[in-house]
Image (tube, coloured by chain):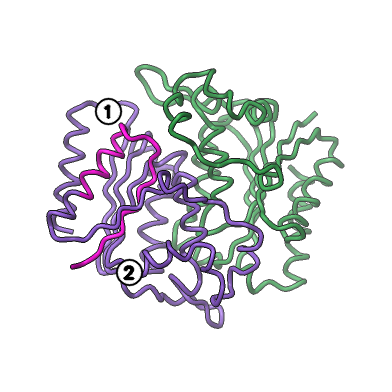
Chain colours: A green, B purple
Amino acid sequence: MTRALVVYCHPQEGSFAAAVRKVVVSRLRAAQSEIRVRDLYAEGFQPLLTQAEWSGYLDAPANRAPVESHVADLEWCDTLIFIYPTWWYGLPAMLKGWLDRVWTPGVAFTLPKDGPIAPALTHIRKLGVVTTCGASWWLTQVVGAPGRNLILRGCGFLMAPRCRKVYLAHYRMDASTPQSREKFRARVARAMARF
Amino acid sequence: MPRALVLFAHPVPESLGAAAHDVVVEALQTRGWEVDDCDLNAERFDPVMTAQERRNYHDTAINAAPVQPYVDRLRSADSVVFCFPVWNFGYPAILKGWFDRVMLPGVVFTIAHGKLAPCLDNVRKIAAVTTYGSTPWRAFLAGDPPKRLLKRAVWGTVRPDKIRYIAQYDMNNITPDRCEAFLARVRKEMEVF
């Protein structure tokens, strides 16, 4: 059975992201997945990697203590799905902080004495992103899609070698219409069903 | 006297990033810049955009109010220097939050008829001084998100006359010599900034 962790990051109740989250969760449930949802705003996640945490950053496994339950979820899942609004071509600070604090040495990767960084999330076989962008698809490509690359490549490097990836974005969100939003919801539903 | 806003986003005083930040401030001052040294961690900048801020995001009459001092500092700067570590191919949350909350419509850009237009005319020079755990090759394969965000998104939105990206890669295997070389490079760049 699939074990899916949904990391959700949007400040507003009733946002389009919340609607998308419902679609994702219902589709995963229909596919008999076990699901855990982390709603970072709702739980008041603290996104700052502090001086104290940075000083103990390399000290695995003690470094997981401040974010123990998040690490447990990350180690439990084999499917990871991010739902967030793209701000400044990237992740909201809250979600970036979740990566900063939870994706630490010994959890997401290891740093062997001599040799390159080694992946430690190879139990994750599927990675999904569902997001909304103010910018157009075209402008996002010109900028080099930093948000997409950060997750699909930067985070993807640390997962199973043949990790399946899906990236779903509603571009030009500020000019969206009920039709475009409905179309996007349907696209998310299809993608999640196949996932 | 030209004014430089230095945004510093490393939590640890004994890091190479902090040493580079010291070099930036000192080099700029010796070259006659008035430096507004903004240590986001020390100032306890809150990087989390709230629901209310999100609702008011496009209302340029009120959207800047929660971060007005930071907007004022940005508006009175002739240059901005970002000093930060790259974590997971991105800015630390505290710096990303500064982008989310301070680089607002009406402050940095305007949106009219779906078109973006720059409106932060005072900032003529921008630099980033940064450190990566990753090797350059790996960062390249990842599409170097922090570099592209600065050199493309920020450049395109602010349209400065000059933009510099000064990076030290492969911090996990760095030697003292290479630390010194990096600091010397930062100093040289800032002296001719």
Check if residue A152 falls in the magenta segment: no
Left or right: where B170 falls relative to B186: right
Q: Quadrant of residue A143?
A: bottom left
Residue A108 x/y as whole percent: 54, 28
Check if residue B2 falls in the magenta segment: yes
Q: Is residue A92 above or below residue B110?
A: above
Left or right: where A88 falls relative to B121: right
User: Residue B174 has which mark?
Assistant: 1
Left or right: where B189 falls relative to B56: left
Q: Is residue A85 above or below residue B112?
A: above
Residue A185 x/y as whole percent: 76, 59
Circles 1 and 2: CB distance less than 8 Å?
no
Task: Tell me which numbered mark, 1 or 2, is placed earlier along the sequence.
Answer: 2
Which residue was labeled with disc 2? B76
Q: Chain of mark 1?
A: B
B32 or B91, which is in the foreground?
B32
Q: Residue furthest bottom?
A: B113
Residue A53 x/y as whole percent: 48, 29
Separation (CA) of disc 1 from disc 2 = 37 Å
What residue is at 47 percent from the left and 35 percent from the top? A50
Quarter containing the N terminus of chain A: top right
Q: Is residue B156 above or below residue A18?
A: below
Query: For the magenta stretch, what is the residue range?
Result: B1-25
Q: Quadrant of residue B123?
A: bottom left
Q: Secondary structure at mark 2?
A: loop
